[in-house]
Image: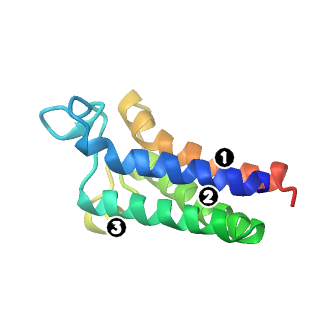
Amino acid sequence: MTTLQKIAIGYFMALMGAASLNYIPGLTDADGRAFGIFALDIFDDALHVASALWALAAALISHRASRMFLLIFGALYLGDGVFGFFTGYGYLDLGIFTNASEGMSFTIFRILANLPHIALGGFALLSVWKLDRA
């Protein structure tokens, strides 16, 4: 198994963990926000599970499939996090299409709410760029 395939397995685990946040007692507040920062709904959970299954399938299929997963997933999630930082909403959950922009904000909550997508997307792209060894 190549490095990128192992990284794709890591993404499978991380994304399944993200999908489970709403279902672990004590991780959500009274308003349904995980860690008091961001709210996840069933659509978000489905997106995380679908992405996780994509990562697992890619890792099990081949190095090339893992590379493609990391490139496409990385670009989509990084872009979603950047949009979220600048507008308050991302595009993967269609939030930028259904909500008015809240404008750019440097609040800790805005940063923390978008950091997971920025970090996951950025690392996926970085791993293809720097760690791609078949």
Image-quadrant location for residue 129: bottom right
Residue type for callout 3: Leu
Residue positioned 46% across, 51% down in the render: 15
- In the picture shown, does residue 97 fall above or below 86? below
104 lies left or right of 35: right
**Camera sees residue 88:** no
Q: Mark 2 near mark 3, Cβ–Cβ under 8 Å?
A: no
Q: Dot 1 corresponds to which residue?
A: 123
**Camera sees residue 134:** yes
Q: Mark 1 near mark 2, Cβ–Cβ under 8 Å?
A: yes
Front-lying residue, 83 or 72: 72
29 lies left or right of 61: left
| Classed neighbour count for the residue bearing mark 3: other residues with Cα under 10 Å, few (<14), some (14–19), many (≥20) | few
User: What is the number of callouts on the image?
Assistant: 3
Residue type for callout 1: Phe
Q: Dot 2 corresponds to which residue?
A: 74
Residue type for callout 2: Gly
Q: Position of residue 122 (x, y in %)?
A: 64, 48
Q: Say which element carries label 2.
A: helix
Q: Say which element carries label 3.
A: loop
Task: Give the Cα separation between the discs numbered 1 and 2.
Answer: 7 Å
Residue positioned 58% across, 68% down in the render: 57
Task: Give the Cα separation between the discs numbered 2 and 3.
Answer: 18 Å
Q: Dot 3 corresponds to which residue?
A: 94
Front-lying residue, 109 or 37: 37
Residue positioned 24% across, 44% down in the render: 23
Ranked by sequence position, the earlier of labels 2 and 3 is 2
Q: Position of residue 5 (x, y in %)?
A: 71, 57
